[in-house]
């Protein structure tokens, strides 16, 4: 246990150093906030453009829905993409993966440590993003002020969400271990699939029927619904309703816990299997870049 | 004094030589179909469904599809040109390029041409996929004008990419982060998914420095008969001016920054 804790700590420190020590602290802080802000403001501009084109027919509740969801979704990309990219970077660019593998720490624990570093950054960026949204847009301010934040549920969803995202990241990292460097596109692609199917920026009721069933099979759908519910309350506007609108927090939490348990078990098995396969095929020290 | 004919011949041969691996690589590594062509459709689809959920005019979904197609070119400019010399340095090719008698502009032009082929395929798949998924119609008022605007936008974009490539010679790991940083803010400023009139005039004017701003606004006017931020003639003139400016600056920057990189010993620095 002590070894796991130590590996986790040093991996998180290493991840933080790699992410942050390329520039001055003030520029790094700007970097952390600019990307999530830009992606949120893009959605804001789309909302205002649609509102102008429809003579104000778009309900004002759409903006906080998109804004809050998008801020939460940043965690998904950061953890999933961060973990798989760590494998690629350490193997291809720094040539360090083999040394990590032969060190006393477990490779899976190392990956989790790296994920926590990226996740921490994304959490900070998300919180700042929300703060700017509250300050700049009356619709977001009103929506967040209208319904009291359910802090207990928020902490629960953040914790269980972290476990879920780390499991997803481990599955991706395991897959990437046996792929060439373009395996990093796998996590980008999956992040894109989730952006489309998990109700991040529009209610899943808008999707064709088949894709709604796929959405309901994805754990991040429940997580995002839970996060929105704790911050914004139940959707007040009919246009924002989804199949999960009638679910209670307990039902959402139950679905999330069940899917996360399955993910954790699968991730543990798959990572071990992939790690052994990569070791047998000499992939741990292979460089595949051009 | 080297004859002009030899100079042009060397330029063209270098360009073809540098474009060749990118063109041949398309055939040898078929996995690009997945991440270059199919996956971008996912984010386009998400933005399309946002407009559909908000019951915006169907034309706006067309804006998203167009923006998605042009995103492919912007990403090509950033990653396959801007950051390319940084990666060439890491893999040890940069010093070979500099030692070779071929001009660096020709090397970069070859990267642009080679990358453009894959990017055009990606953009075509995005547009086709978007049209099939959302049943949006594209009806250009003038094909000749559309092609002119498109080519001018690409010329200006790739000129900007050549400038980036030379600037990134001075950077280490910051290059990757800066390139990463230039994605979302550019999507925001250039109005990738929405008409520019959402912005106040001064912001749109600042954003006009990026060729995509005027290029996409002009293409939206031609394809969807949408209201533009500036008249079409102004935007065509702006794109032509930006093309000339960026290509000129790229040549000057390349020479200056190559000299500086040699002086500071950055040509062969790796793993930074």
Image: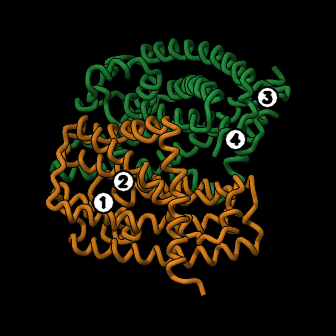
Measured in 3D between alpha carbons, the distance from the residue under mark 4 to the one under mark 3, in whole angstroms, is 14 Å
Residue A222 in the image, given as x and y percentages of width and height: 43, 22
Q: Residue at x 54, y 77 (%)?
A: B7
Measured in 3D between alpha carbons, the distance from the residue under mark 1 to the one under mark 2, in whole angstroms, is 8 Å
Q: Residue at x 34, y 49 (%)?
A: B69
Residue picked out by circle 3: A101
Residue A133 visible in image: no
In which quadrant of the rendered image does the N terminus of chain A lie? top right
Q: Which chain is green?
A: A
Q: Choose the circle earlier in sequence order: 4 or 3.
A: 4
Residue picked out by circle 4: A92
Residue A170 in the image, given as x and y percentages of width and height: 62, 25
Q: Which mark is residue B216?
A: 1
Query: Considering only vertical position in the picture, is A31 above or below A232?
Result: below
Report in which chain the residue with disc 1 lies. Answer: B
Residue picked out by circle 2: B70
Q: Are marks 1 and 4 on the same chain?
A: no
Q: Are marks 2 and 4 on the same chain?
A: no
In screen coordinates, is B107 left or right of A71?
A: right
The shade of chain B is orange
Q: Are marks 1 and 2 in contact (CB under 8 Å)?
A: yes
Report in which chain the residue with disc 4 lies. Answer: A
Q: Are marks 3 and 1 on the same chain?
A: no
Measured in 3D between alpha carbons, the distance from the residue under mark 3 to the one under mark 1, in whole angstroms, is 48 Å
Q: Are marks 2 and 3 on the same chain?
A: no
In screen coordinates, is A220 left or right of A123?
A: left
Report in which chain the residue with disc 3 lies. Answer: A
């Amino acid at each position: 246990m002590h070894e796991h804790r130590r590996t986790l700590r040093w991996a998180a420190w290493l991840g933080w150093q790699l992410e942050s020590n390329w520039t001055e602290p003030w520029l790094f802080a700007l970097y952390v906030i600019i990307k999530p802000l830009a992606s949120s403001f893009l959605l804001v501009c789309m909302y205002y453009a649609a509102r102008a084109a429809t003579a104000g027919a778009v309900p004002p509740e759409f903006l906080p829905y998109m804004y809050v969801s998008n801020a939460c979704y940043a965690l998904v990309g950061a953890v999933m993409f961060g973990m798989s990219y760590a494998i690629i970077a350490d193997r291809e660019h720094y040539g360090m993966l083999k040394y990590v593998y032969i060190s006393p720490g477990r490779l899976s624990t190392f990956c989790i440590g790296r994920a926590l570093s990226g996740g921490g950054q994304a959490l900070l960026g998300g919180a700042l993003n929300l703060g700017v949204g509250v300050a700049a847009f009356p619709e977001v301010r009103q929506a967040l002020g209208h319904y009291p934040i359910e802090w207990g549920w928020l902490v629960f969803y953040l914790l269980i969400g972290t476990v879920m995202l780390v499991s997803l990241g481990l599955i991706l990292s395991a897959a990437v271990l046996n792929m060439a460097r373009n395996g990093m596109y796998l996590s980008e692609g999956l992040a894109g699939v989730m952006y489309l199917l998990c109700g991040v920026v529009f209610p899943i009721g808008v999707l064709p029927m088949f894709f709604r069933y796929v959405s309901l099979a994805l754990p991040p759908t429940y997580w995002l619904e839970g996060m929105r519910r704790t911050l914004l309350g139940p959707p007040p506007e009919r246009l924002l309703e989804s199949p999960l609108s009638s679910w209670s927090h307990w039902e959402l939490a139950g679905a999330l816990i069940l899917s996360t348990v399955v993910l954790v078990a699968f991730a543990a098995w798959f990572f071990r299997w992939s790690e052994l396969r990569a070791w047998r095929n000499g992939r741990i020290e292979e460089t595949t870049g051009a | 004094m080297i004859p002009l004919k030899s100079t042009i011949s060397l330029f063209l041969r270098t360009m073809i030589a540098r474009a060749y691996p990118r063109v041949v690589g398309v055939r040898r590594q078929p996995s690009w179909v997945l991440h270059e062509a199919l996956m971008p459709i996912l984010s386009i689809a998400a933005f399309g469904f946002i407009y559909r959920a908000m019951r915006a005019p169907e034309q706006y979904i067309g804006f998203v599809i167009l923006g998605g197609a042009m995103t492919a070119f912007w990403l090509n400019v950033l990653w396959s040109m801007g950051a390319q010399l940084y990666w060439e340095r890491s893999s040890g090719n940069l010093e070979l390029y500099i030692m070779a008698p071929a001009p660096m502009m020709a090397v970069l032009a070859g990267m642009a041409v080679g990358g453009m082929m894959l990017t055009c395929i990606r953009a075509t798949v995005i547009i086709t996929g978007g049209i099939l998924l959302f049943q949006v119609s594209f009806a250009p008022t003038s094909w000749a004008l559309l092609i002119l605007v498109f080519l001018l936008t690409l010329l200006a974009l790739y000129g900007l990419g050549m400038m980036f490539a030379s600037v990134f010679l001075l950077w280490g790991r910051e290059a990757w982060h800066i390139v990463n940083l230039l994605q979302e803010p550019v999507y925001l400023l250039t109005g990738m998914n929405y008409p520019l009139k959402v912005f106040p005039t001064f912001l749109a004017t600042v954003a006009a420095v990026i060729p995509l701003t005027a290029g996409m606004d002009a293409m939206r006017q031609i394809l969807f008969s949408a209201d533009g931020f500036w008249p079409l003639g102004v935007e065509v003139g702006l794109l032509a001016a930006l093309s000339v400016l960026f290509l000129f600056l790229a040549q000057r920057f390349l020479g200056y920054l190559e000299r500086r990189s040699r002086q500071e010993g950055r040509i062969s620095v790796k793993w930074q």
